[in-house]
Amino acid sequence: MTDGAALENPPGRFVPRRVEPGFRSRGGPTVTPPASNTARGGPGGAVGPPPIVSVTRRAGAVAGPPQTVWPARPVQPAPAAARPPVPAELADAFGALAPYLTLPAVTDVLVAPGGAVWLDEGAGLRRDGARPLAEEDVRALAVRLVALGGRHLDVAAPLGDVRLGDGIRVHAALPPVSVGGATISIRVPRAAGLSLDELVAGGLATAAQHAALTAAVAARRNLLITGATGSGKTTLLAALLALAPADERIVIVEDLAELQVRHPHVVSLEARQANLEGAGEIGLARLVREALRMRPDRLVVGECRGAEVRELFAALNTGHDGGAGTLHANSLADVPTRIEALGALAGLSPDAVARQAASALDLVVHVSRAEGRRVIAAMGVPVTDAAGRLRLEPL
């Protein structure tokens, strides 16, 4: 496909950056928790999206006049798949918290200092009505869960972060680091990841955004999904990766394995913390380098949070199209600053990281949470300004 042909595509379509002939890149039911607790809550109101414009991009530039589209956002909630029972060994380990893990819509189970249990079922946090857990029970539970993940939690090492079962992520903190008492944060993966169509039906994206994202994946665009904690970055990224052709190999690098992708060929690499003697650590930067030796068709970094951004940008700039990653940011406008900060950790100057990012990334998608609903708040294209600094051209 030529650049001229790309300009003739309908709005919302993307075209591949590399156009050489023959190019082929290598590269459910409610479960009653303990005591008198019952599940409640639901999705919040819909939030109207900003206008979306269609663009054709080549070499970091916006081509042609934008066309504004004002689509309506669907408001029906996405279906919540019923979760299977927690395996017996995990049910014993989670104790009083085990029933919460089977609630269809729950994404987070949090135990605050003092023993109060808070739940997030997609509409924001709510406090559960059950009697608070005793401090000694919370502490014992935290130590047990972290030990089940192969780590040690005590006064000398009061923080722990582990993955259990099929992707249940547990973080625990003990006093004196956690002032007021022990606390536990549990991130619960969905029973089955939602497809992009299901996310659109639930109001995450408009029809125009859906078309643009689908075209971006098909054209092997390099994507960066940004947003705050719990905004839906991982959910959206998994849905987009599921659109990749079945004959492509997806290699995922994560600090803790969370991405669950409906795809027949996925390799997941997980970082390893150092042991008590300070040995054996395998960081994300090394895993990205190792992933490049595994013949990935699509390279994915679950969350960029340090110097690994240098390796990711280098990979995406050397023939590895169709890559993706996530990044914590408060808004689309804050993304350049966050990327510059990560680049500084890798020893890159603001000018250098700007050129790397503008060349490596094709599309930045920012997701946010408003009135209890996760939505795509904005999308943008990375470019460099006259001063050589990174900025995003909103779509």
Image: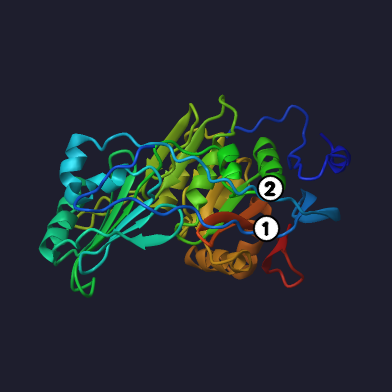
Mark 1 secondary-structure assignment: loop
Q: Where does the C terminus fall, quadrant-wise? A: bottom right
Direction top: furthest residue = 247
Would you place residue 311 above or below residue 251 in this image? below
User: Of the residues shown, which amino acid type is indicated by label 1?
Assistant: Pro
Query: Looking at the image, can residue 44 be seen?
Result: yes
The residue closer to the viewer here, 81 or 297, is: 81
The residue mark sitting in front, 2 or 1, is 1
User: Of the residues shown, which amino acid type is indicated by label 2?
Assistant: Gln
Question: What residue do we see at 15% from left, 51% from top?
Answer: 144
What percent of the width, then of the height, locates residue 1?
Answer: 81, 34
What percent of the width, then of the height, locates residue 207?
Answer: 70, 44
Q: Which residue is mark 1?
A: 49
Q: Are marks 2 and 1 in contact (CB under 8 Å)?
A: yes
Would you place residue 190 above or below residue 273 in this image? above
Mark 2 secondary-structure assignment: helix
The residue closer to the viewer here, 195 or 122, is: 122
Query: Looking at the image, can residue 276 be seen?
Result: no
Q: Which residue is mark 2?
A: 209
Label 1 crowd (10 A; few <14 / some 14-19 / many >=20): some
